[in-house]
Amino acid sequence: MRILFRSGAFLVSLIVMVSHARAEDLNDYPTSARADYVFGCMKANGETQEILQKCSCSIDVIASIIPYDHYVTAETILSMSQVTGPVGSEFRSTEPARLAIQDFRRAQAEAEIRCF
């Protein structure tokens, strides 16, 4: 019985540690980045309470799929690819840029399925 209790206590401790790790992973996006995403999402989809909930869900899903530094990279590439001329071309045509955008779009698509 004592061994069973110890292994049960160990299991509970392990579950608590894993749940904290997941919470930390989900919270590596700064609040300002989450808010900026939600504001943009609401501007594109409507400024209602329902859309607020859906957009908040969306950034949470994205945050659970890609790390914050990949998110920043994708956002930067998307922004810079709108620049005309050779500078913008570098962000539109390189393989690393294409892959970063592809990962971001996949995360957005998953968020769309789960939240909208």
Image (spheres, grey):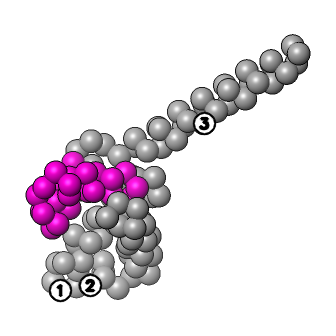
Residue at 37% x, 51% y: name it.
60
Q: Could you say where residue 54 lies in the image, as x and y percent from the top left?
A: 27, 56
Q: Which mark is residue 51?
A: none
Magenta span of residues: 35-62
**Residue 13 placed where, x, y %?**
66, 25
- Please tell me which residue lies in front, 34 or 92: 34
Q: CA distance from mark 1 to mark 2?
A: 6 Å
**Residue behind mark 3:** 18
The three-letter code of the residue at mark 1 reads: Gly
Circle 1 residue: 85
Judge whether 58 appears above or below 34 on screen. below
* Residue at the extreme top of the image, as rendered: 2
At mark 2, the secondary structure is helix
In this view, the residue in front, 3 or 14, is: 3
Determine contact: label 1, label 2, CB under 8 Å: yes
Residue at x-position 33% and y-position 53%:
57
Q: Splitting the image into 4 quarters, where does residue 26 fall?
A: top left
Where does label 2 land, which residue?
89
Label 3 SS: helix
